[in-house]
Image (cartoon, helix red, strand yellow):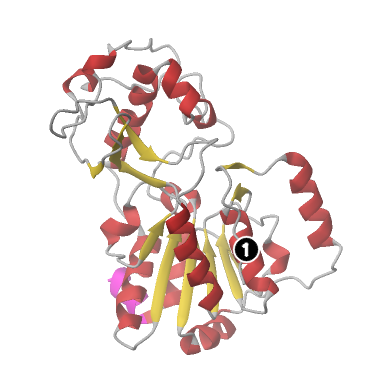
Amino acid sequence: MIVLQRSCRGLINSHLYVHLKRQWGSQNMARPSSDLAAFREIFSKAKNIAIITGAGVSAESGVPTFRGAGGYWRQWQAQQLATPEAFSRNPSRVWEFYHYRREVMLTKNPNPAHLAIAECEERLSKQGRQVTVITQNIDELHRRAGSKNMLEIHGSLFKTRCMSCGHEAANYKSPICDALEGKGAPDPDTNDAQIPVLQLPRCEQKSCHGLLRPAVVWFGESLDSDILTQAEKVLDSCDLCLVVGTSSIVYPAAMFAPQVAARGVPVAEFNMEDTPATMRFKFHFHGPCGTTLPPALGRLYWYKYQK
């Protein structure tokens, strides 16, 4: 049984990271295979496929990841703004940050990796086979590509939650409120807009008008237990797992694929670089996901896209 930590979202701490690298490295595992034909053979027989995706997939669509060198909005990294405490201290600044991200996302499109996953999901469903996407991304690009069987474990940029009544709703307004129009510039020299709280996005439920927040899981918050339960069932039943564009250092997703691999299920990693979990997996395909994933999931789709 897959054991999922229902703890707060956050980066793996340095002590645990070192421990895992030592633990995995000490097993003297063989280098994962990059044999596409061997992967395709296993893929052709799989009945329940879990695909775990991370920021690397969206980065190929030009979506900022706010990680690593240059990963700042103004002078802040996402971890400094994506917290309940930051929103409580300065909801205007946090809403500027998320307004900027929402507006950027409206200019981006799914890339070949998103499209290959969605096409694979649709094609295999007609064969009585199941593909489930478990994504750490909040940009809805999988949904826009056509994926329907999907778990968004960190929520969505295009959903809001009321701080007063708790109501959640999809929200694709651009701008999300009048006061945020033209705000959110990422340049370090840009001053905060200091928008009054009453002019920030407000709940439209009758007799409420409470302050809205992005319906995403912030650092320090617990993940949705219902979504984690669904993910647990998917991972327990899958007979093939793909890890696509994820660093394998953000919990709880960092342990999803290693725990699947521990019960002998083939895991294939598609990433630009090795991760702390790479040596646990049967396959590793190095390179941009938009290049490596389409031919792995279906050559018919690959040729169609190239044309």
The picture places residue 41, in percent across and down from the top left corner, at 53, 88
- Mark 1 surroundings within 10 Å by alpha-carbon count, few (fewer than 14), some (14 through 19), many (20 or more): few
Tell me what residue is drawn at x 86 percent, y 63 percent: 26
Q: Which residues are magenta?
A: 300-307
Between residue 100 and residue 218, name the one nearer to us. 218
Q: Of 9 and 184, which appears nearest the observer?
A: 9
Determine if residue 135 is in view. no
Q: Quadrant of residue 99?
A: top left
Q: Quadrant of residue 285?
A: bottom right
Q: Is residue 178 left or right of residue 255?
A: left
Q: Which residue is mark 1?
A: 3
Q: Is residue 64 above or below residue 5?
A: above
Measuring from the top left, give residue 53's x and y in whole percent.
48, 58
Judge from the rendering whether residue 171 lies leftward or rightward of residue 283; answer left or right.
left
Write the residue at 24% across / 21% down: 180
Q: Which secondary structure type mostly characterizes the magenta part of the structure?
A: helix
Q: Image quadrant of residue 97?
A: top left
Coordinates of residue 185 in the picture (x, y in percent): 34, 21
- In the image, is residue 166 part of the stretch drawn in magenta? no
Q: Image point 56% across, 42% down: which residue?
A: 8
